[in-house]
Image: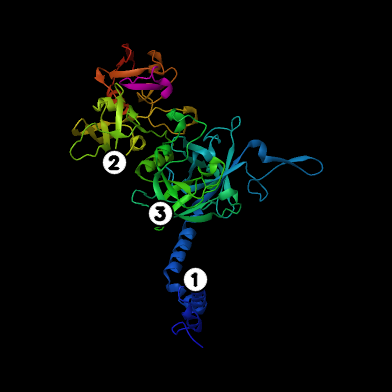
Amino acid sequence: MWSCESTPPVFKAVSTARGSLRGLLVVVLAFGACCSTTLLAQAPALPVVAFEKTVQNLVERNQGAIVSIARVRPSATEMIIGPDQRVTRLDPLDPDFVPNEFASGILIRGANPQEPVVLTCYHAVRNGQRYGQPVKGDQSRLFVTFTGRKGCWATVFAADPRSDLAVLALDSGALRSGDLNLTPLELGRADEMTKGQFVLLLGNPYAIARDGSASVTMGMISNMTRRPPPDPLVARDDSRKAKPTIHYFGTLWQVDARLSLGMSGAAAINLNGELVGIGSSLAALDGYEKSSGFVVPFDTGVRRIVESLIRGEEVEYGFLGVSLNRAPVVIPRAIEGYPRVLYGTQVEMAYPYSPAWNGRIEPGDIVLEIGGVRILQGDDLMREVGLKAPGTVVPFKVLRGQQELQLSVRLGKWPVDWEDQIVASGARRAALRGLTVDYSTGRWKLLPQPIRFLPGVLVTEIVAESAGSRAGLHVGDFITEVNGQPVGTPAEFTTLVTAAAGKLKLTLADGRQVTVDAE
């Protein structure tokens, strides 16, 4: 007999076969066989077993907040059964029920702490029934299944196509019943996460979670600031269509875990148990599976987006108002401290009255940094500007000629396109004297043609029979002054109008003077 501490006979048998791969394989196999009992006995002390236990605990702690989302067309809730062709309604909780489309979601705290909401991906619930409205046209109903096969109907409370994120409101009756016993997750912070860290992904691939039990996979963050594959059917020079979401500017984590169909909306949990992102199966949507997947990280910019959606508000994005030279930056002659080929992106034009123009950015400027973040290419600039809120004052480092400058730019608002796809159940700004205003760049369809930017604020809605309506104002008007005071943001408009007790004298961008009575 021999033990792992002594030299086993097989080692001696192959000692004359030094350099033989076959002999080495025999040694490894024999050593593994002789030590298996000892290793198993020591298993609780092994790091890999401790790691496994950590993963199991994380899954147990978080899986109750993962939901399955089924998109159900109204016609699909009816089926013909029996020899008499009797029509009966099918329960989405029935084990035989097959949804038209499916996804995952995460329970998080709502604006009312007593009413959790579901965070998911917009593309998974696009054209779903909207909050407070009946099902219209070809809209789908949304059914949410929780752990333990409990479930309820849900509606789209807020949705933002540009971030591909949405928040669902659960049926209020089901919440009041107290039967669901829901435990939402807190949003974590992903800013400190780095390449090489692991995340767990809990979701619902292929709608298999009929029992409400989430599936789990694990992957390493293999890269950051990634972008989804481009749509081959869209021309690359049409940037608004070629890059329909902000993720095409490089916001995503790439993880070495396949996120198959149905994993859109999966929770990304780090090994500290924090919710640091939401999975997206954008790679699978190309029509074939990929060996890696994407995660939208909950960094500062994305957390701002999610918090807006929780409040039911339209999500706003920062805007600069420049066109960029996409060619590599090459300076014509040597500048001390800089290489001939620079990082950064070069400004081709700063449009008049745009935030860049007001911030004194000039054509030819090379943007090196924004908010302390190094800019390597144009997409980096678009991403960093977009993830900030309109009205934010951001420091820019630019190279102008041979001089490095520090500029401060107050960002505007990215012009909203696809307005009909935005869902906002709550108003970001209250109507004043019947007028709802936005940043002057707030709506793409209301910008003057050819595209130019005007100072002031933009009228986006007018309450019928209100003071603003009676004054003859129209949607699309640009207000530049209130009682002789310049106005450039919705916040400034609110301050000036609220402070005015009597009539308002408004100056419009086209030169008109309008008087609005008090209400």
Image-quadrant location for residue 488:
top left
Q: Residue furthest top?
A: 512
Residue at figure coordinates x 46%, y 65% from the top left:
53
Q: Secondary structure at mark 1?
A: helix
Which residue lies at the image location 23% right of the left edge and 27% below the top edge? 360
- Name above or below for residue 448 compared with residue 120: above
Q: Helix, strand or loop at disc 2?
A: strand
| Nearer to us: label 3 or label 1 | 1
Find disc 1 in the rendering and name its residue: 21
Residue 365 % position (x, y): 25, 30
| Magenta span of residues | 444-460
Give the mark nearest the N terminus, 2 or 1.
1
Task: Say which label, 2 or 3, has the lower sequence index.
Answer: 3
> What whole-number distance in Å separates the C-alpha atoms at marks 2 and 1?
50 Å
Amino acid carrying mark 3 in the image = Glu
Q: Is residue 12 magenta?
A: no
The amino acid type, in three-letter code, at marker 1 is Leu
Q: Which residue is denoted by mark 3 in the rendering?
A: 274
Kindly state the secondary structure of the residue where label 3 is placed. loop
In this image, 3 relative to 479: left or right?
A: right
Q: Give the x, y percent position of residue 68.
A: 55, 48
Instruction: From the image, tell me which residue sits under label 2.
Output: 374
Is residue 462 something that shows in the picture?
no
| Number of numbered discs visible in the structure rendering | 3
Classify residue 474 by image quadrant. top left
Q: Is residue 332 depicted above or below 281 in this figure?
A: above
